[in-house]
Amino acid sequence: MERSKGVNIKNLTKIYLSHSKNSEFRAVSDISVDIQAGEFVTLLGPSGCGKTTTLRMIAGFEIPTSGDIYLGGDKINDLTPDKRDTAMVFQSYALFPHLNIYDNIAYGLKLKKMNKETIKEKVSNIIDLVGLKGMENRSPNQLSGGQQQRVALARALVMEPGVLLFDESLSNLDAKLRVYMRTEIRKIQRKTGITAVYVTHDQSEAMSLSDRIIIMKDGIIEQVGSPEEIYGKPKTKFVAEFIGNVNFIKGKIVKLEGDKAIVKVLDNEFKIDYSGEKKESDEVDIVLRPEAIELCKSGILEGVVVSSTFMGSYQDYVVDVNGDLINIEVTNPKEKEQFEEGDKVKLNFNLETLHIV
Ligand SMILES: Nc1ncnc2c1ncn2[C@@H]1O[C@H](COP(=O)(O)OP(=O)(O)OP(=O)(O)O)[C@@H](O)[C@H]1O
Ligand SMILES: [Mg+2]
């Protein structure tokens, strides 16, 4: 969409004061991030990490304690929410129960005093886009949860905002519908090219929707990156653990060579990409994803099977490697060699998948 705008957040902080004003809470702490026009970015993190607060500051519902927010290059700190060129899709839909679907969607345009014909054209385009054709005259309580969510989305889209904001917008839907609606949202966002900032604590939602994910923890940004970067090259243990299952193996840096580190793990030495701050002879944690490991009779590390559980699409093994319990997910288990509790096994993995946090 030519109207879509980038969002620049500069040193943004929000401190909430308690009612008695004698204690304060730092919900968002000096965060900076640049979101490109047309990009789909997710704020992901555990409950209370400051996602909603950040989104509400972009929308103008919450006033920053310090820092600046720019939309399309213009500073918007001092604008009221209605002047900001943002639109929010709420978790609760927030539809007007006494208005039909058409009027719910047209509401914002009418407030803008747009002429009737233009409104009609815009609303019917959006109704097509979100797949609500034929439902114009129904009232919200005659729609399913998923359909109501579409109305909420349409109502935001029809305003053609510079950025579309979502706060846990799908969390009221059942699991199947949630997965379906997220692909719909992604399709519509791609089609319109609108900038989207999406808040969620659901990692699979973030992975499937986003061009980039912003991982937050305790009011700060831990990492910003594409889903592939966040999963494959997490910067911290927190990020690695927050996205998917993970094993950490202890190692010790033997030598640093440019952007590689030679790391000793038990009797092995691995050469791993590394550009962090650790020095020679420092201990490090190495990330090894459960699905990146193969179990076989000859391999890199040695262990003993502690448990083996059939999970349907994969076999879940726990293997004791020198006192560390390593989780392994073997896909298509029926086609692979099977091991039982107490079996001695070797672990094999592609050295490229190793990553130091
Ligand atoms: N109005 C407020 N007054 C005081 N503290 C607040 C207020 N709003 C939020 N907080 C606190 O700020 C922190 C961040 O809240 P926020 O709603 O941004 O979290 P969140 O990441 O959206 O969490 P969730 O996933 O649970 O929605 C929390 O510890 C919360 O208790
Ligand atoms: Mg929240």
Image (spheres, grey):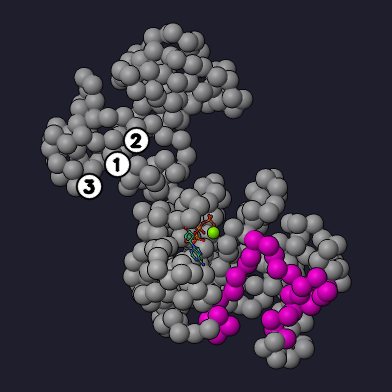
Residue 252 lies in the magenta-colored region: no
* Cα–Cα gap, marks 2 and 3: 14 Å
115 vs 122: above or below: below
Where residue 311 appears, as percent x and y from the top left, is 59, 24
124 vs 296: above or below: below
Extent of the magenta region: 81-110
Q: Which residue is mark 2?
A: 287
Q: Which residue sits at x=40%, y=15%? A: 296
Q: Which residue is mark 1?
A: 357
Which of the 4 quarters of the picture holds residue 66? bottom left
Mark 2 vs 1: CB contact within 8 A: yes
Where residue 174 appears, as percent x and y from the top left, is 70, 47
Mark 2 vs 3: CB contact within 8 A: no
How crowded pointer 1 is (Cα within 10 Å; few <14, some 14-19, many 20+) is rated as some
* Cα–Cα gap, marks 1 and 3: 8 Å
Q: Amino acid at mark 2?
A: Val
188 vs 203: above or below: below
Query: Which disc, if any, is residue 276?
Result: 3
Report whether 108 appears left or right of 216: right
